[in-house]
Amino acid sequence: MTAVLPPRTPVQRPTGGRLIDQFEYGLDAPICLTWELTYACNLACAHCLSSSGRRDPRELSTAEAEAVIDELQRMQVFYVNVGGGEPTVRPDFWHLLDYAIGHDVGVKFSTNGVKLNKARAAQLARTDYVDVQISLDGATAEVNDRVRGTGSYATAITALENLAEAGMKDFKVSVVVTRENAGQLDEFKALTDSYGAQLRITRLRPSGRGADVWDELHPTMAQQKELYSWLLANGDGVLTGDSFFHLSAFGEALPGLNLCGAGRVVCLIDPVGDVYACPFAIHENFLAGNVRSEGGFQRVWQSSELFADLRNPQTGGACTKCAHFDACRGGCMAAKFFTGLPLDGPDPECVQGYGEHALAARDLELVTPKSHIDHSHKGPVRGQPTLLGIPSIPAKICDESPLAGLDLR
Amino acid sequence: MTGPDTGPVTIPADEVPFDPSLPWRKSPSVALRPEPFGALVYHFGNRKLSFLKSQPLVAVVKALAEHPDVPSTLRACDVPEAQHRAYVTALATLSRSQMIERRDQP
């Protein structure tokens, strides 16, 4: 399981110094973690990082999920990013939301908006300690629906309208930056502002189904440069999940944590309780354990061999000799892994151009690592994305149903 | 979490300079999570997250409430005189994000 990591000599944690250097050695509990509650999803987004679609029958039960929340409270993990799949299609979603908040675990959840009718929007507006992120990958229906599926733009906009009307504060519009929407950043900002919401943009990773479309969708070098300038100009008002730290190698560091936090300050709990180093690394090589095993999540976080390996600074590899290494720290582990690049080499989107060279130099025979976890819908899905050239099935009025599309086989 | 309904209106801390001669305390809405290098600081009210980068600073933040002002807190925590200025700067930052707050009683 740990053979995937380049050898790192374990080093004693330094005393004092910069926080980022301390973070490389890990924390006693995550700063926050991502918890995907279900692999079930009404959509079939072309770039889904968790290859979601069908519910996994081994999904954590309500009682098991409550036990995880109890444990997070004991470990003083003060908030979780809840996602999926589409988390709100879990029948106990609203219960778990209240349960977490009641146990000092704040919830920030990502949704495509399918369940956010007026009543739910009003409920959320009344609830403290909850954050909502509506996913939108195009500032126009045309751009969004090509990737997320026909009708998904309308669903998201309705949810935004409902939240704004209910007086919800500080909700977010969450955008994955792609080659097709990179030119729409100002439009996204304007759209978000018009609902009194906050814009959050994050990086496209070649994870899950994202691996199938990454070549086609990841921003070009010119777009990365524009994105970097845009972030420097607008960074204060825009959230990024600190996901663009590889862009810091352009020069000035971007605000936030410029470090891969995988297994050090963040991790992922997937719907069946498996703990991975990060949300973009659903692959057996990055599987640290399961919350159902003895000792629960705490033991996985504090004692897994994989996480111990990750909690060391990278000392070798081509990147450590680069003048920009302190700025980007070699970039995203998951992006390298799923494009078949060595983990101690450059990020495939290295802004100094080393990634492009590394990609070009890959062995032609190389088969990029593929996750064995795939919950993608097997049959056609209503309004499925047209990006892959599959003809779209028209969206119907009953888009509200989480099972939309499942009955078409 | 002091608001208009629950107590005196707090003047936003960044509008007045940090005054170390006054009595301070860790905000009751703040939790300190021990970490190997110091602590993670979380404010349940404004949901800000911060870090205390050393164990002595953690000790100082915890001890504030037991002393009439910042200098006496620092002395009680055996912080060398030469470092007092750095500690006052760190505490001023924490007051700006409401992690520590003035207390009424000395």
Image (cartoon, rainbow, N blue to C red):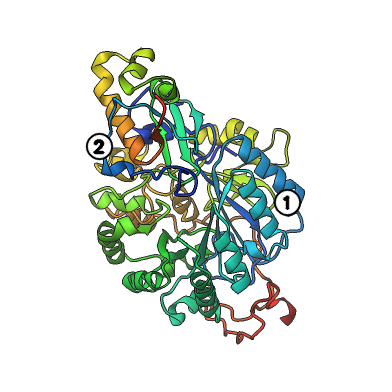
What residue is at 30 percent from the left and 50 percent from the top?
Answer: A254
Q: Chain of mark 2?
A: B
Give the residue at x 60% y 30%: A303
Q: Residue type at mark 2?
A: Pro
Circle 1 residue:
A60
Instruction: Give the x, y percent position of residue A405.
Output: 68, 78
Between B106 and A129, the residue placed more toward the observer is: B106
Left or right of residue A104, residue A25 in this image:
left
Labelled disc at residue A393 = none
Q: Nearer the viewer, mark 2 or mark 1?
A: 2
**Which SS class for mark 2?**
loop
Q: Quadrant of residue A351?
A: bottom left
Q: Is residue A109 visible?
A: yes
Tell me the SS state at disc 1.
loop
Quarter in which the N terminus of chain A is drawn:
top right
B73 w.r.t. A374: above or below: above
Chain for mark 1?
A
Residue drawn at 41 percent across, 63 percent down:
A198
* Residues packed near mark 2 inside 10 Å, few (<14), some (14 to 19) or many (20 plus): few
- Quadrant position of the C terminus of chain A in the picture: bottom right
Residue A267 drawn above or below residue A393: above
Q: Amino acid at mark 1?
A: Leu
Asked if one can make out residue A12 in the rendered structure from this viewpoint, the answer is no
Decide if residue A316 is on the left or right side of residue A373. left
Q: Nearer the viewer, residue A232 or A304?
A: A232
Q: Which mark is residue B17?
A: 2
Q: Position of residue A174 (x, y in %)?
A: 46, 64
> Label 2, label 1: how many angstroms apart (C-alpha)?
50 Å
From the viewer's perspective, tell me whether residue A382 is left or right of residue A59: left
Q: Is A377 above or below relative to B12?
A: below
